[in-house]
Amino acid sequence: MTEAKPDIFKYLDYRAYLRDVFAFEQTRNKRLSLRALAARILPALSSSGLLSGVLNGKKNLGHDLRVKFSAGLKLKARESQFFELLVQFNQATDLQEKDNFFSQLSRFSHSRAKTIHEGQYRFFTRWYYAVVWNYFGINQKQKNPMEIAQAIHPPLIPAQVIEAIELLLGLGLIKRLANGYCVTENHLKTEPEFKAMEAMQYNQQFLELATQSLYAIEAKRRLFNTMVFSISHSTVEKLREKMIAFQEEAQEIISQDPGSECIYTLGFQMYPNSNTNRLSK
């Protein structure tokens, strides 16, 4: 039995959608090449590397091409609207823009974006959701939003605590007790398509908090160190492997901790400060 044509509302990555559409068309006519399929959408695509560049993430789709792709794929009005937003969401580099496009995608009923927006995606949009979650790993006998807000650094307002509690309850990450809340055994599962974006949002917020802590936290309660060096590409990979291994080791140490007394954030960064092509000239 021939599989149904891919439903665009089930996708969070327009490139994955295009690849599946082309694969579906080829199952219907195995003689059709990718170039021939591309020509159906836009004749110019049959003689250029644009399509392969788009599919492998090396090229983006501008507005005019998005319109032509929608027409070539014979998308209906709402499908075209979703496709337009999906492309913009995937191609956006600014976090606020990305969040805005995702919010618009989530308004389409039966879309994967709607399901995620109502759950896991929100968890990564505010740094204090994770902190409040960890707070209940320490104190299960406190439910006063004001007390919880003042126990967190930087301090929250009660409304933020209430907001966090509602989200955590909805995700099943905490449960109510007689006098407070406690964490459950559940862990938040992340959709593969959103790992990179969530990482950007999450890290950006905590990097901003790290900057604040340089001035707001006494030295004996924090540790900052910066190294600037010149090395080979092979050594860069060795350092990356060491950092990943340390992260796994740290997680193991944390998981074996017999008790909880405070909340900490551990972050470390390594990034280039040079353009290799420029330096080699």
Image (cartoon, rainbow, N blue to C red):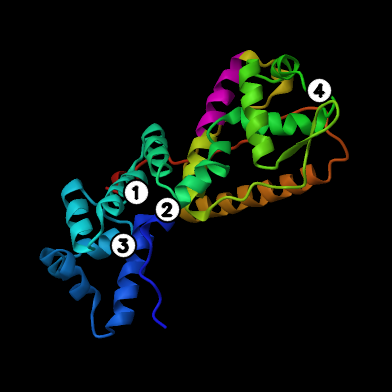
First in sequence: mark 3 vs mark 2: 2
* Residue position marked by numbered label 2 in the rendering: 12
Is residue 56 placed above or below 134 in the rendered structure? below
State the separation of the CA atoms marked 2 and 4.
Answer: 39 Å
First in sequence: mark 4 vs mark 1: 1
> Amino acid type of disc 4?
Gln
Instruction: Determine if residue 155 is in view.
Output: no
Answer few, some or many: residues within 10 Å of disc 2's Cα (few below 14, many 20 plus, some between 14 and 19): many
- x, y percentage for residue 156? 63, 17
Q: Secondary structure at mark 4?
A: loop
Q: Residue furthest right?
A: 258
- Identified at 40% across, 76% down, the residue is 3
- Residue 252 versus residue 135: which sits nearer the camera? 135
- For the N terminus, the quadrant is bottom left
> Amino acid type of disc 1?
Leu
* Residue position marked by numbered label 1 in the rendering: 86
Which range is magenta? 204-215
Tell me whether circle 3 and circle 2 mark residues in contact (CB < 8 Å): no
Query: Going by the image, does 50 lie left or right of 178?
Result: left
Is residue 278 placed above or below 238 in the rendered structure? above
The image quarter containing residue 13 is bottom left
* Residue position marked by numbered label 4 in the rendering: 142
Query: Going by the image, does 208 lie left or right of 28?
Result: right
State the separation of the CA atoms marked 4 and 3.
Answer: 51 Å
